[in-house]
Image (cartoon, rainbow, N blue to C red):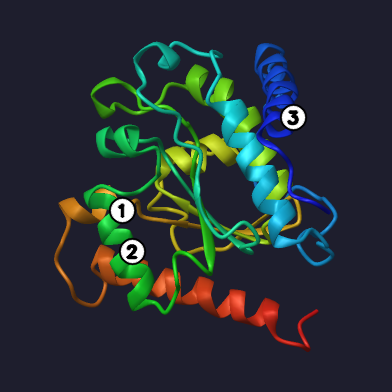
Amino acid sequence: MPPRSQRQLRGDAAAIAGAAQEGAAHGSADPAGPDTASPATGAGRTTSGSDAGDSLRILALACADCQACPLAESRRQVVVGRGHPQARLLLVGEAPGAEEDASGRPFVGRSGQLLDRLLAEAGLDRERDLYIANIVKCRPPQNRRPTAAEMAACRPWLDRQLALLDPPLILLAGATALAGLLGIRSGISRLRGQWQTWQGRQLLPLFHPAYLLRNPRRGPGQPIDLTVGDLIAARERLQALTRPDAG
């Protein structure tokens, strides 16, 4: 398939934006919680890297025009995602901070720098092995936690990312990601490190890097070491998926 022109990409983006904002207006987001039955995903993907990249660029163009919630009034940029367009591992965080709002890329501030170091320690390549996104694509003022209404308004964009990426493995970084995707509001500590099944996908809650910055001690049982262990577990599941004899 020949590369799509900027005009074609813009046209596709306008159509996606209209559908996403209509979905937000009608409350299409419906977090079902873990253990929701659904066909397994990721195994039969046939989209080429080029097509997947085009689809994500179209999504980013569409999302840039979103006015579905008041965060659009104060943002500098919409922060959609970064990483490999055919990654089988998706990491979902909370929302952009000041540096992400300025750059248009998620997890580039202090939290992101720590995340990159922990990914490397666990043997994961951030550009090859995973794609990174957030529950909310615009920065909340003063880096406050997104409201339930803001998460609901932004959910169609995350749903579209899930449909395009079709990741069999998802990491949920922090309580907001857990609540935003699964509707679970009991906090991250109770479920951290425990694999969940949701819509045919395997999900692993883990501490948000911002929490790790506030708890920097290393050692057995410390939050950073627990997180490295969680990331190693994710790497092992990812490798199991890519083995020739995998399911």
Residue at 26 percent across and 72 percent down: it is 221
Name the one closer to the observer, 76 or 214: 76
Q: Which residue is mark 3?
A: 12
Q: Residue furthest bottom?
A: 245
* Residue at the image position 50 percent from the left and 13 percent from the top: 69
Disc 3 residue type (three-letter): Asp
Residue 244 in the image, given as x and y percentages of width and height? 76, 88
Using the image as rendered, state which of residue 150 and residue 124 is in the foreground.
Answer: 124
Quarter holding the N terminus is bottom right
User: On residue 90, which mark appears?
Assistant: none
Q: Is residue 32 visible?
A: no
Residues tagged 2 and 1 counted as in contact (Cβ below 8 A): yes
Q: Residue 220: where, in percent of width, then height?
A: 24, 77
Which residue lies at the image location 81% right of the left edge and 62% below the top edge? 45
In this orientation, does residue 5 appear? yes
> Could you tell me the amino acid type at mark 1?
Gly
The residue that disc 2 covers is: 116
Q: Horizontally, is 20 left or right of 191 in the view?
A: right
Please identify the quadrant where the C terminus is shown.
bottom right
Q: Quadrant of residue 145?
A: top left
Q: Looking at the image, is mark 3 or mark 1 earlier in the sequence?
A: 3
Q: Compared to 147, does 213 lie above or below?
A: below
Tell me the crowding category of disc 3: few under 14, some 14 to 19, or many 20 or more residues within 10 angstroms, Cα based: some
